[in-house]
Amino acid sequence: MPVQQIIYHLLRVYVKTERLTESVDNSKPAIMSNYHIKTLMLWACEMKPESWWTFSSNLVEISVELLNILSVWLTDMRCPHYFINSSNLLDNSFNVKNVARKLSSVHKEYLTTWFISHYVGQCAQLCPIHVLQLFGDVSTSVKLQKAVSEIVRWRLNTSLHDKWHAVITAEVIITANVSPHSLTANSCICWISELTKLDERYTVFFSSVALLHVALKISRNGFDGLWKSILSTILRHNCSQCRSVLSRCKTELNTSELIKLLQKSAVEHLTTYRQLMARDFGSVAATVTTDIKALYAYKRDQYQQCLQLSAQNVHTLLYARCIPEVQTTPEFIQLMDDDIVSLSALTLIVNPKCRHNLNNSCIS
């Protein structure tokens, strides 16, 4: 449970900060390791009822009791292995008397003060100055509560932005790995399977990049059984609308028609991806949902539609602080106007290595 994860983390920080996992002069074997803390937590999770974690005690009280249990184990020189019966994680090579004595003396007031100064205080160093200043005086519980609440409020406000940045980074990583390599049916299965475990957005984005990748390869090398199997893998894991693309691929479409169909399907995937981004991160980043669609409309000479979409997008992005970028890898270039393609080609003529860093080859 989250409370168990937090306590496990607190205990590890405590024993590490107090150097209880080291010998005094490093000349003797370590007193104990993080595995002893992990073992303590595993047994506690099994032996203590759920109410003990969630209702009967606070975090400090639970941590104190667990440290006292660890003290008894060290005194008795017996730390029962959680997975291996009759196995003891302590033996006579451990010099544990001083550590056991220190852990047995830990009480609520001491550990509360310790966490405030060594843990919460350290966290506060990462906060803006107006939050950090609150920790100049935490002499009362009201002042401490206010200071900690400000940390929580600040972190909640920044965590969504951090997550947005992580998703944007994932876009670059996915494209950087798909673009220079040729996909296979097996690699697509692996990509989709692993990305699905992480986040639905990643799967949608990968599918769009993969469709563009296949369209690019077909335009250069023609359509054969390899690309048909890859398309079957990509589209089988997507919506019924995408499966209709697969059924049309099995008919006698010429190469030009097939490329257009794949590009259109990729644009629809990217639009869906943008909609997910706008839904989840609209409060931290200005996200338009039709930027790729506008690009593609211009490419297809649908100028009126492009003008309407672009006017809406400019209005949304005009005063935005965070604006999404479109990558200029070969997969995305095929959706763009010839002038942008030519300009991107010029950058490669001037410096062929610029594409090695995808942060250098994006258009906002």
Image: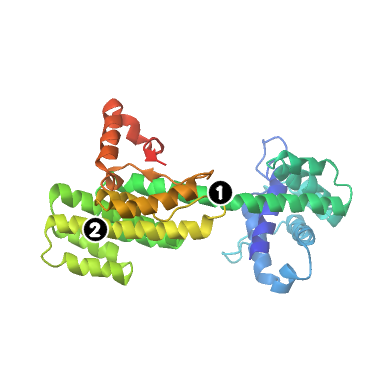
SS at badge 1: helix
Q: Position of residue 3 (x, y in %)?
A: 68, 63
Residue closer to the observer: 180 or 266: 266
Residue 90 visible (yes or no): no
Mark-to-mark CA distance, 1 and 2: 33 Å
Q: Is residue 204 above or below residue 17?
A: below
Residue closer to the observer: 99 or 194: 194
Q: Is residue 163 left or right of residue 124?
A: left
Foreground disc of the pair 1, 2: 2
Give neighbour class at mark 2: few <14, some 14-19, many 20+ (Cα, 10 Å).
Answer: many
Residue at 38% x, 45% y is 326
Name the residue that disc number 2 marks: 262
Q: Is residue 29 above or below residue 353?
A: below
Tag 1: residue type? Asp
Q: Is residue 173 left or right of residue 1?
A: left
Tag 2: residue type? Leu
Q: Position of residue 253 (x, y in %)?
A: 13, 62
Name the residue that disc number 1 marks: 162
SS at badge 2: helix
